Image (tube, helix red, strand yellow):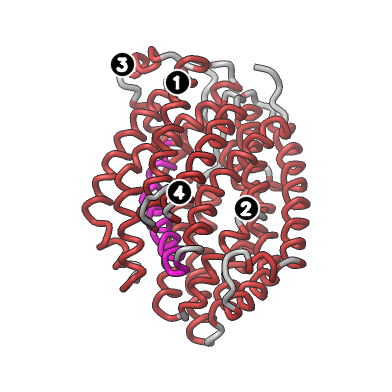
Amino acid sequence: MKELRLFNLAWPIFIETALFMLLGFVDVFVLSRYDDLAASSVNTANQAVSIITIVFTVISGASAVLISQYLGAKKSENASRIAALSIVFNFATGLFASIIILVFSKNILSFIGARGRVLEFSSLYLSIVGGFLFLQSVLSSMTVIIRNHGLTKISMYVTVGMNLINTTLDIIFVLGLFGLPRMGVVGVAIATTFSRLLGTAVLAWFLFKKVESLKIFKLLKPFPFSDVKDMIKIGVPSALETFLYNLSQLVITSIVLNFLTQAELITKTYVNNITMFFYVFSISIGQASQIITGHLVGARKTDEAYIKAFKSYRCALAITLVLALTGVLFRVQLVSIFTDDSQVITLGANILIINLLLEFGRTTNLVLIASLRGAGDVFYPTGCAIFSMWAISVLGSYILAVVFNMGIYGLWIALAADECFRGVMMIIRWKSGKWKTKRVVSDE
């Protein structure tokens, strides 16, 4: 395989990630033209989905590390076996998760504090999108396989198509064009699900036509229990970190729902949808850095991996801070895209200033944690997350927002403190070089 370069890998991942985020952004934006509370309800439902889909990250995250290291070590059959295992496991777990959501959607949402119209809207959305969650699980596996073969443009093209379909159907269904009734939240859910269905079908065709063969499933006989052990060893700590993050965000959402005002709930939804475009570069650069690090560690080129990861981090930080500063300059205009409520606009504009500090820490985590994962170093980031997300983010949010009555401002300060603390710890870990001993694949 030719040398993997950061820019060549990162820019398609950036476009794909930005467009994938845009799926949620468009949902919220179109619904904001329909009902502010409906927009916030979809955001609440998606937080619940994020918790349930953590199991997918156990498999996809582990397979990303193993496939990249096996390809770096020139062991293509091993990489193919991991790919087959990833698809089978993710489909099975995705199907199980879909059933759980269909049966318990209202219970899940009630548990996190959704009440009244928020519960009504969010349960409608969750029952449809969550019921077809197995599509997302398979899509996740196939994307990881294709990306780690260096073909990041392919999943980008698929995501472009998904966005076009989703946006078109959102507008038609939610606003009731062409004589259709205004379907609101149900329309958004149908549009999202249908676009995922088509995206999964197209990506599956490409994967088994151009990258792998359907014969890879024969590599699962006899069943590779040692591969499962490696996937659990890598995937569980990585997924636990993601799980803790999403669970902490869910608890924070519960704090907002139970203790803060409706205006603050709406503000949180809109600011989240604005700031995700600040760190989308960091996500794409981090994922590209993970692929490169995995290949280099698999090839035992750890010194080169050390240098390239730090270059990736500096690049991501520069881009993110420029975007975040631009967001501060145009903060009123950005929040006004969603609403004309003066209270929400004022709250959102002020939060975007505090958010500058948060983006510094978040960028550091997105790039360096991804690089550590690529090297196989998964326990250290998880250990830091267990402490920081709960002692600083969740507890800090409650103390500042509720006890000290700082509201959404206190919540954002706690979130920023969490990201910055973990960011400093990740810099220390990468500089220590201890990750160089965490290579997963053997030379046998």
The amino acid type of the residue labelled 1 equals: Trp
User: Over which residues does the magenta segment extend?
Assistant: 35-59
Secondary structure of residue under mark 1: helix
Q: Residue at x 37, y 31 (%)?
A: 228
Instruction: In the displayed orientation, state which residue is furthest to the left.
Output: 103
Q: Which residue is mark 3?
A: 221
**Res. 300 image quadrant:** top right
436 and 109: which is toward the camera: 109
328 to 46, vertically: above or below = below
Nearer to us in this view, 229 or 173: 173
Q: Which mark is residue 272?
A: none
Along the line of sight, which residue is nearer the eye, 279 or 246? 279
Query: What residue did someone put label 1 on?
Result: 205
Residues at marks 2 and 3, CA–CA distance in whole angstroms:
39 Å
The residue indicated by pointer 2 is 365
Counting residues from the start of the chain, the first of labels 4 and 3 encountered is 4
CB under 8 Å between discs 1 and 4: no
**Which one is closest to the eye, mark 1 or mark 3?**
1
Percent across and percent down for residue 60 are: 45, 36
Residue marked by disc 4? 172
Residue that protrudes farthest toward the front in the picture: 179
Mark 4 Cα-neighbour bin, 10 Å: few <14, some 14–19, many ≥20: many
Q: Pointer 1 and pointer 3: residues touching (CB < 8 Å)?
A: no
Chain-order first, disc 4 or disc 2: 4
Q: CA distance from mark 1 to mark 4?
A: 28 Å
